[in-house]
Amino acid sequence: MKLFRKLSRVLNSIWSIPIVLVIRLIRPFYHISIIRLFSERIGHFVVDSMHQSIKNRELTKNQKNFYYIAHENCNAQWTKMVKRNLLCWDCFEHLGYWNNKISGRMKHSQSSRVFSDSRDIKGQFEKNPLQFNFKDGEIKKAQEWLKSFGWEKGDPFVCLIVRDNSYLEEAPEYINRNLNWSYHDYRNSDISEYENSIKWLLKQGTWVIRMGKRAKKRANIKHEKFIDYPFLDSKQDLLDIWLFANCELCISTLCGADEISDVYRRPLLLINFLPLAVAKSWSNAMYVPKKLTWTKTGEELTLKENLEHSLYYSKEYTEEGIGIEDLSSEEILLSVKECWNFIRSDMKEVEGSKELQERFWKIMTSSHTSKYYYGEIDTKRYHDWIHPQARAGMNWLRSKGKHFFQ
């Protein structure tokens, strides 16, 4: 495969190098940028391509963006939708390669993450109409799949995705590259802790689809309206996108695929996740994170300390003397009930919530510097535009004492 790619690169240089040189020559009159979309991970792939679609509306008549997707492609359906909405051709990958090899590349290339590392901090999704629509045949195919389980058109369904070790350990080679993904273990959850919540949702008459391309273990639930999707032979890339895009509610441990529901403006419940600082404040979303405590005293971190310790690696929490506690099954159930009742009541404000939510957002939108992944983040910059329905779980907030808000 590597030999084939090298040969292809050489052969395609015959036409791509001259075009790159022409792009340089016409720059004073017509500016072309060649942009690679990060297609290895679905969260970045979805958000970045949506942002690029929005950005293209701002281009002048003398500007044009060419896009390409690398060989590492996490979802064929989203790739189709990208190519329907952006000027995205496979051959542009050769232009991108030689553009990076020839002097002057910076004037004709840019990061696809134009709005702060795939975060919609300016609220562009809410302010711009969606363009990534499904074709009639795709909709029919997805609905027929659901109907094969007994679903009827108009029946609500909830998508639940719970990250576990298989999320990256069993991922394609281009993602895992033989790395030890245990540094991410603090982001994992056990599906069994969500079973009571699934059963409660089923009693409300909604379908529940446990999502994911792969999972460690099945949910111990037998019900005509429950689908344990990761273990089905019929799962497919179209369904991965369409189901998240059309669900009544997406419940997620913040693992990337929830970005599909987000860009299609579906309500979100982000639960049992870390770090709190990266919560999607631009979305109709409710947040209930994992609990952080100081290992020496057992005392819970304040909200400010949570933001100042938005760490990326498991070992960093240990080194800082911070313990991580998953939410209990009861806490998850309370959060699911709260969120479901909220969206079912036309998102009316919960009684007594205004003051607590204001205190929460005052701290969340203050400037707190924290090291995260490859550098530092300023949490204030991460929450520039707040969705009117973005909120912390009220049961979660009410469980905290005054110390939490200090």
Image (spheres, rainbow, N blue to C red):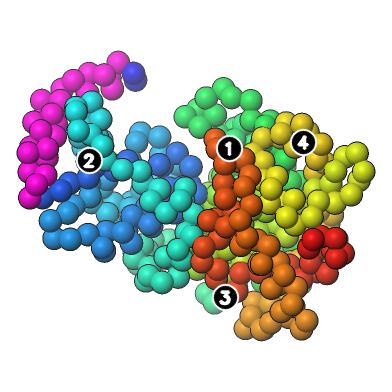
Let me know if residue 19 is in the magenta part: yes
Amino acid at pointer 3: Pro
Q: In this view, does 191 lie to the left or right of 66?
A: right
Which residue was labeled with disc 3? 388
For the point 85% across and 43% down, the residue is 294
Mark 1 vs mark 4, CA separation in Å: 15 Å
**Residue extent of the magenta highlight:** 3-29
Residue position marked by numbered label 4 in the rendering: 320
On screen, residue 375 versus residue 299, left or right, reads left
Q: Nearer the viewer, mark 1 or mark 4?
A: 4
| Residue holding disc 2 | 107
Query: Mark 3 to mark 4: distance in Å?
Result: 35 Å
Structural distance between the alpha carbons of marks 3 and 2: 38 Å
* Residue type, mark 2 in image: Lys
Q: Which of marks 3 and 2 is in front?
A: 2
Q: Mark 1 points at which residue?
A: 373
Residue 259 at x, y = what percent?
52, 56
Quadrant location, the C terminus:
bottom right
Figure check: 380 above or below 295:
below
Q: Work out whether mark 1 precedes mark 4 in sequence or the reverse, and give the earlier one.
A: 4
